[in-house]
Image (cartoon, rainbow, N blue to C red):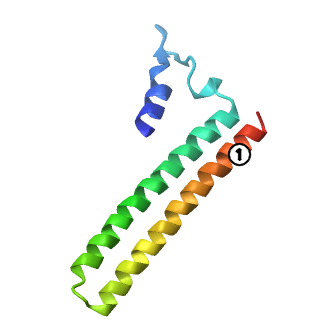
Amino acid sequence: MLHSLLHYALATITISDNGIINSGTGFSSLNPAGVFSVVANTIIFLTGAISVIMILVGAIRYVVSAGNSGAVAKAKDTIIYALVGLVGAAMGYAAIRFIGNFFK
């Protein structure tokens, strides 16, 4: 998503013969709600991706703990906090969609 966002922003930049930079239909033509939506969706996507990675890290720590109660507790905490982050990202996405649809 970030790649497509950068591609969209940079694909419309042109340089005229006299050296003036023009940004055809890039961010300058987007309305503020559109820019906010793109930025918010990118942040929510990154939060969700990091949460999934941390769930995997917690699972690996749990398997490798070999019964050590301290390591098991840390692995469980990692998984719980990652799940909270994933739920938070989902709720953020729902809130952004609701507010976006409300103001359209």
Residue at the (56%, 16%) spot, across then down: 24
Q: Position of residue 75 (x, y in %)?
A: 35, 79
Q: Tell me the SS state at disc 1.
A: helix
Residue at the (64%, 23%) spot, across then down: 29
Q: Extreme bottom residue here?
A: 69
Residue at the (29%, 78%) spot, across then down: 62
Q: Position of residue 12 (x, y in %)?
A: 49, 19
Please name the amino acid that badge 1 sits on. Phe
Q: Which residue is mark 1?
A: 98
Q: Position of residue 7 (x, y in %)?
A: 43, 28
Q: Is residue 81 left or right of residue 103?
A: left
Which corner quadrant holds the C terminus? top right
Residue at the (61%, 56%) spot, across then down: 91
Q: Nearer the viewer, residue 76 or 23?
A: 76
Q: Position of residue 61 (x, y in %)?
A: 28, 76
Which image quadrant is residue 98 in?
A: top right
Q: Is residue 58 above or below residue 50?
A: below
Which corner quadrant holds the N terminus? top left
| Count of numbered circles on the image | 1
Q: Residues within 10 Å of mark 1 (few under 14, many from 20)?
A: few
Q: Nearer the viewer, residue 2 or 28?
A: 2
Q: Extreme top residue here?
A: 17
Which image quadrant is residue 100 in?
A: top right
